C-alpha cells in the first residue's frame, strides 16, 4: 500500500515535471537585456520547462579579483549585488550562519515554485474532486439501495460488542481525524474559498487557529491509532471467511449477509487502510512538525532507484540529493495526498456506520447491539460469544 501511494505521488508530481522538461524552452534572444534573463526565461521555469541557466550560474563575480575591501574603492570590481544573489541562488556563495541547522545556509530554493504550482493546482483540484465525488456516490448509493435494514424480527436482547475502552479509542481516533481533516482543508484551500467570504484579516485568525489546532490534535490521532491497533489487530487478521464475504459483496445488494467473525472483510479493509495510511500520515506529519529532522524521501528514492522501480515507471533516476526544503515539500505533498485518500475512505465508513445501516451505530454508541443485528452481520462472532457465556448469556439484557 505504501509503495502504491508513493508511485501515485511520483507519477503525478515527477512525471508532470519530466514531461515538461522533455520539451526544453527555446533559448530566447537576450540581446535586449544585455545577456540578462528575460520574461520568457522566468515563465518557462515556472511552467517546469528546462532552461539553460549557465548564463546566470557562471556570472557570480570574482571576489578575489576585486579591490581590497578596506581600500578606498571597497569591493568595486569584485561582486555586484546581482552577482551576489546569483551566487546565493546557485549555492556558490560562502555563507555562514549563527544557526547550524541543516537549512540555515539555504537562502534561495526556487524548486518551491514547482511545489507551489502542484499544491495550488492538481493537489487542490483532484483532492476536492475525490471528496465531492465520494459524497455524491454515497448519496446515489443511498437513493438506489436505501438503508440496510435488520431483516429478521428483533429479539429485544442486546449483546456487548465493544467495551468502553474500545469505544474511547475509536472516538479519540475518529474525532481527532475529523478535526485534522477540517483544519487541513482550511490550510490547503482556505485562501481560495475563505478569503473571498471573510476577508484577509478574519482568515488570518482562522488560519493561525487551524494550524495550532492541527499541530496539537495530531498527538491525539497518533495515540488513538496505536490504541485501536493494539486492541483490534488480532481480530482483523485475514481468514477464509473473508473470501466468501467478499465474493458475496457483504450482502449489500442481496438479501441475507454472509457469515463473519467480530470484523467482516469490509471492516478489515477499513482497519488496515486506517493503520497503513494513518501511519504514513503520522510519519509525514512528524516530519512537518519537526522541520529538517526526519528526511525520508531521499532514502526512499535511492531504494527505488536501486531496485529499478523508477525505471519500470519510466521516471528515470529519481533525485537522491535533496535540499532540506525539498524534503519538506515532498513531505507536505505526501501528507496531503494520503490524507485525501483516507478522508474518502472514512466518508464511506461514516455512511455505513450511521444512516447507511440500521443498528450499526449502536456498536460504537452504547457498545450494545441488537442480537438479531449481530446474528445477521456477525453470526460467527455471536456463536463465539454464546459458546463462552452459555446458551443464555448473562450479558444479554432487554432492550429499552
Image (tube, rainbow, N blue to C red):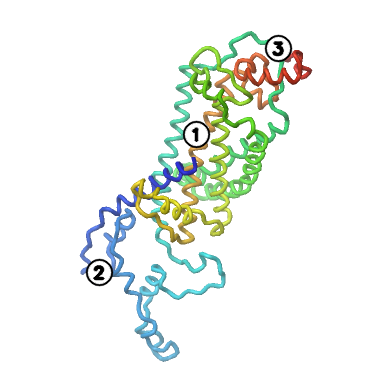
**240 left or right of 375?**
left
**62 left or right of 176?**
left
Tell which circle, 1 or 2, labels the residue nearer the N-terminal end. Answer: 2
Q: In the figure, 386 relative to 173: above or below?
A: above
CA gap, disc 3 to disc 1? 35 Å
Q: In the figure, 375 relative to 9: above or below?
A: above
User: What residue is drawn where x is 48% and y is 16%?
Assistant: 253
Which residue is disc 1 drawn over? 344
User: What residue is drawn where x is 71% and y is 12%?
Assistant: 156
CA gap, disc 1 to disc 2? 51 Å
Cβ atoms under marks 2 and 3 closer than 8 Å: no
Task: State the image coordinates of residue 178 (x, y, percent, origin top left).
Answer: 58, 37
User: What residue is drawn where x is 47% and y is 56%?
Assistant: 298
Tell which circle, 2 or 3, labels the residue nearer the N-terminal end. Answer: 2
Q: In the figure, 178 relative to 310: above or below?
A: above
| Disc marking residue 33 | 2
**347 left or right of 301?**
right
Which residue is disc 3 drawn over? 156
Tell which circle, 3 or 1, labels the residue nearer the N-terminal end. Answer: 3
Depth order, front residue of 247/216: 247
Task: State the image coordinates of residue 286 (x, y, percent, origin top left).
Answer: 58, 51
Amino acid at each position: 500500500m505504501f509503495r502504491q501511494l508513493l508511485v501515485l505521488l511520483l507519477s503525478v508530481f515527477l512525471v508532470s515535471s519530466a514531461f515538461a522538461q522533455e520539451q526544453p524552452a527555446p533559448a530566447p534572444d537576450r540581446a535586449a537585456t544585455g545577456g540578462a534573463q528575460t520574461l520568457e526565461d522566468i515563465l518557462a521555469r515556472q511552467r517546469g520547462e528546462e532552461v539553460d541557466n549557465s548564463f546566470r550560474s557562471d556570472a557570480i563575480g570574482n571576489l578575489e579579483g576585486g579591490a581590497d575591501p578596506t581600500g578606498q574603492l571597497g569591493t568595486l570590481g569584485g561582486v555586484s549585488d546581482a552577482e551576489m544573489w546569483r551566487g546565493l541562488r546557485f549555492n556558490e556563495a560562502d555563507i555562514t550562519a549563527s544557526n547550524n541547522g541543516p537549512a540555515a545556509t539555504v537562502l534561495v530554493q526556487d524548486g518551491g515554485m514547482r511545489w507551489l504550482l502542484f499544491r495550488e493546482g492538481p493537489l487542490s483540484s483532484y483532492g476536492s474532486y475525490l471528496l465531492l465525488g465520494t459524497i455524491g456516490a454515497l448519496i446515489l448509493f443511498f437513493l438506489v439501495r436505501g438503508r440496510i435494514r435488520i431483516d429478521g424480527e428483533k429479539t429485544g436482547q442486546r449483546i456487548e460488542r465493544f467495551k468502553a475502552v474500545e469505544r474511547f479509542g475509536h472516538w479519540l481516533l475518529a474525532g481527532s481525524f475529523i478535526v485534522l481533516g477540517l483544519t487541513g482543508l482550511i490550510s490547503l484551500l482556505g485562501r481560495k474559498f475563505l478569503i473571498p467570504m471573510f476577508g484577509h484579516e478574519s482568515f488570518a485568525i482562522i488560519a493561525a487557529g487551524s494550524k495550532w489546532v492541527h499541530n496539537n490534535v495530531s498527538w491525539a490521532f497518533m495515540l488513538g491509532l496505536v490504541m485501536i491497533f493494539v486492541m483490534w489487530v488480532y481480530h482483523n487478521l485475514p481468514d477464509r471467511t473473508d473470501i466468501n464475504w467478499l465474493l458475496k459483496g457483504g450482502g449489500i445488494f442481496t438479501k441475507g449477509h454472509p457469515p463473519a467473525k467480530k470484523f467482516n472483510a469490509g471492516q478489515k479493509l477499513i482497519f488496515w487502510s486506517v493503520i497503513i495510511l494513518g501511519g504514513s500520515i503520522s510519519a509525514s506529519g512528524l516530519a512537518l512538525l519537526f522541520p529538517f529532522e526526519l528526511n525520508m524521501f531521499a532514502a526512499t528514492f535511492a531504494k527505488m532507484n536501486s531496485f529499478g522501480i523508477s525505471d519500470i515507471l519510466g521516471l528515470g533516476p529519481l533525485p537522491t540529493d535533496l535540499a532540506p526544503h525539498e524534503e519538506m515539500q515532498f513531505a507536505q505533498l505526501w501528507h496531503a495526498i494520503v490524507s485525501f485518500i483516507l478522508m474518502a475512505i472514512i466518508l464511506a465508513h461514516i455512511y455505513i456506520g450511521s444512516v447507511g445501516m440500521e443498528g450499526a451505530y449502536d456498536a460504537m454508541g452504547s457498545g450494545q447491539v441488537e442480537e438479531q443485528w449481530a446474528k445477521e452481520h456477525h453470526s460467527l462472532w455471536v456463536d463465539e460469544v454464546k459458546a463462552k457465556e452459555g446458551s443464555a448469556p448473562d450479558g444479554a439484557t432487554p432492550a429499552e
